[in-house]
Image (cartoon, grey):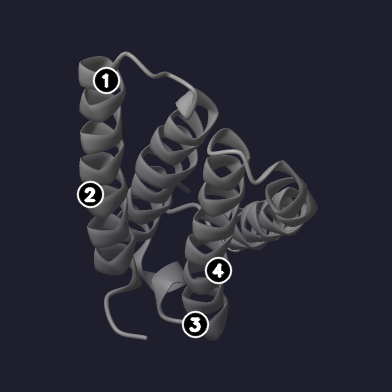
Amino acid sequence: MKDVAGLHFRAAVLCALTGMVMGIFMGVTEDHSARDAHAHLNLLGWVSLMLYGLYLRAHPAMATGKLAGAQFVVAVIGVVVMIASLWMMAMGNFELGRAMVPFGAMLTLCSMLMFALLVFRTKSSRA
């Protein structure tokens, strides 16, 4: 994958925009039942993906391997599954949403473990 850091940035911005629209919608309708999905979208989507991208931009050698690309894919799928699950629960499809949440959570955890591998593999440029 080329420019994995850039992919993280783009995905993060899409999550931020979606989270903002979701927040505005909740405010206008005064229906805050999707607040869990909104919070997770902003934290897992916007913040985590942006931080992953910033790290990879600061350490470009770590962004060139297959692990960085796989980590991006797992992170994005994890965010999508988690947010969809929480949204379903908020909209009344509690059983399906609750059944899917663990998959999103495990994907998100796996993406963080993959990121940890990238971080601990990084060699310091300081002597």
Of mark 1 and mark 2, the one earlier in the sequence is: 2
Question: Residue 4's spot in the image, x, y percent?
Answer: 34, 72
Q: Amino acid at mark 1?
A: Thr
Query: What is the CA distance from the residue labelled 1 to the residue labelled 4?
Result: 36 Å
Say how many tags the image has. Answer: 4
Report whether 78 appears left or right of 57: right
The residue under the point 55% across, 77% down is 70
Name the element at disc 1: helix
The numbered mark, 4 or 3, whose residue comes first in the sequence reads 3
Measure the alpha-carbon separation of dots 2 and 3: 24 Å
Disc 4 packing (10 Å; few <14; some 14–19; many ≥20): many
Of marks 3 and 1, the one in the foreground = 1
Q: Are marks 2 and 4 in contact (CB under 8 Å)?
A: no
Distance in Å between CA atoms under marks 3 and 1: 45 Å
Label 1, residues with CA under 10 Å away: few <14, some 14-19, many ≥20: few
Which of these two is toward me, 27 or 81? 27
Determine whether label 3 and label 1 are within 8 Å by CB.
Answer: no
Amino acid beneath label 2: Val
Which of the pair 39/56 is nearer the observer? Answer: 39
Q: What residue type is disc 4 on? A: Gln
Label 3: which residue?
A: 65
Q: Which disc, if any, is residue 13?
A: 2
Mark closer to the observer (2, 4) = 2
Q: Does the CB distance between marks 1 and 2 fall below 8 Å?
A: no
Label 4: which residue? Answer: 71
Which circle marks residue 29 in the picture? Answer: 1
